[in-house]
Image (spheres, grey):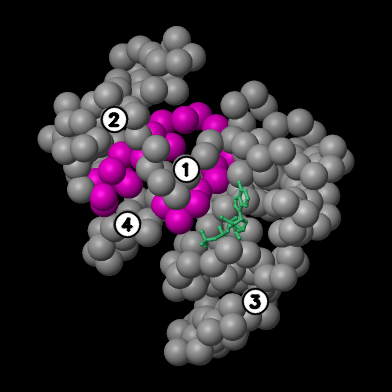
């Protein structure tokens, strides 16, 4: 049995300038699972992630963010990867990805070795000394991913982490992320139904302030479905998003 905590959120309510985004959303993600959150632009996906990460003040004090059993999450239990890479421009790549340990005053050779190994896996080994402004958008996104992976947090929230990379790099990053995040509970926002079908154990759609959980007929992971079943699920996602089914 895994000791990784899952994630439970109860009573998530948020509005901006009296315009409600969502109200009383409650959901639970099992330990060490990957959940994708889809929805039309502006429906509130990033806001929901920020609320869970504690970066947004909830409308109501009844918001609960706990492990899947309702127990408090460990300190520094949530890692956050924003839509914008938010790299510190005055630090080089190595210093950016070890910033967490640096701030906690725990940086040691183990962290440095882990960081070098990660940069190697992300094909950034020769960029360790580069500053963010010397990198392409995709390289910066990979540095941001490395920084997220360097955090020991069991819960990882990611907001469109693969949006700035080309199709081949994205596919490689998918495979790598599946491997490197296997022991964490992941909630990821994406605009891409195929990405969600490839990566997730569970898929949710946020629309009109409500969350719809997409369940597969036999409860399998979407990636385990037959091609026909996956196509049907993709068409369902597209129709729920209000788009034209492929
Ligand atoms: N700090 C804020 N103050 C006021 N309104 C905000 C704030 N942050 C977001 N909004 C508004 O809330 C709505 C939801 O924004 P959010 O970024 O959560 O959407 P999203 O679903 O993640 O969109 P996208 O897919 O385009 O990134 C938008 O209409 C946005 O303009």
Q: What residue span does the magenta drawing correspond to?
A: 137-161
Is 32 displayed left or right of 119 in the figure? right
Mark nearest the camera among 2 and 4 is 2
Residue at horizontal 53 percent and vertical 36 percent from the top: 79
Q: Which mark is residue 164?
A: 4
Say whether marks 2 and 1 touch (CB < 8 Å): no
Q: Earlier in the sequence, mark 2 or mark 1?
A: 1
Q: CA distance from mark 4 to mark 1?
A: 13 Å
* Residue identified by numbered label 2: 89
> In the picture, residue 21 is in which quadrant?
bottom right
Residue 143 in magenta stretch: yes
- Circle nearer the N terminus (4, 1): 1
Regarding mark 1 in the picture, which secondary structure is present there?
strand
Can you give x and y, in whole percent of width and height, for residue 159 in the image?
50, 52
Q: Residue furthest left?
A: 126
The image quadrant of residue 162 is bottom left
Nearer to me, 133 or 62: 133
Residue denoted by label 3: 216
């Amino acid at each position: 049995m895994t000791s990784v905590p899952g994630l439970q959120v109860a009573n998530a309510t948020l509005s901006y300038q009296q315009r409600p985004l969502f109200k009383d959303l409650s959901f639970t993600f099992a330990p060490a699972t990957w959940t994708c959150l889809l929805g039309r632009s502006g429906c509130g996906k990033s806001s929901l992630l920020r609320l869970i990460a504690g970066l947004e003040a909830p409308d109501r004090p009844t918001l609960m963010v706990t492990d899947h059993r309702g127990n408090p999450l460990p300190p520094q239990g949530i890692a956050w990867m924003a839509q914008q890479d938010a790299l510190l421009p005055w630090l080089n790549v190595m210093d950016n990805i070890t910033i967490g340990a640096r701030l906690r005053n725990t940086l040691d050779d183990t962290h440095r070795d882990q960081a070098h190994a990660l940069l190697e896996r992300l094909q950034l080994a020769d960029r360790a000394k580069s500053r963010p402004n010397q990198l392409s958008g995709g390289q910066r996104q990979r540095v941001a991913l490395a920084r997220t992976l360097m955090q020991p947090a069991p819960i990882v929230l990611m907001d469109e982490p693969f949006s700035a990379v080309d199709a081949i790099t994205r596919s490689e990053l998918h495979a790598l992320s599946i491997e490197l995040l296997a022991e964490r509970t992941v909630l990821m926002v994406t605009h891409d139904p195929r990405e969600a079908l490839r990566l997730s154990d569970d898929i949710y759609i946020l629309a009109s302030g409500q969350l719809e959980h997409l369940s597969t007929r036999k409860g399998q992971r979407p990636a385990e479905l037959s091609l026909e079943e996956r196509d049907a699920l993709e068409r369902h996602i597209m129709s729920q998003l209000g788009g034209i089914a492929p």
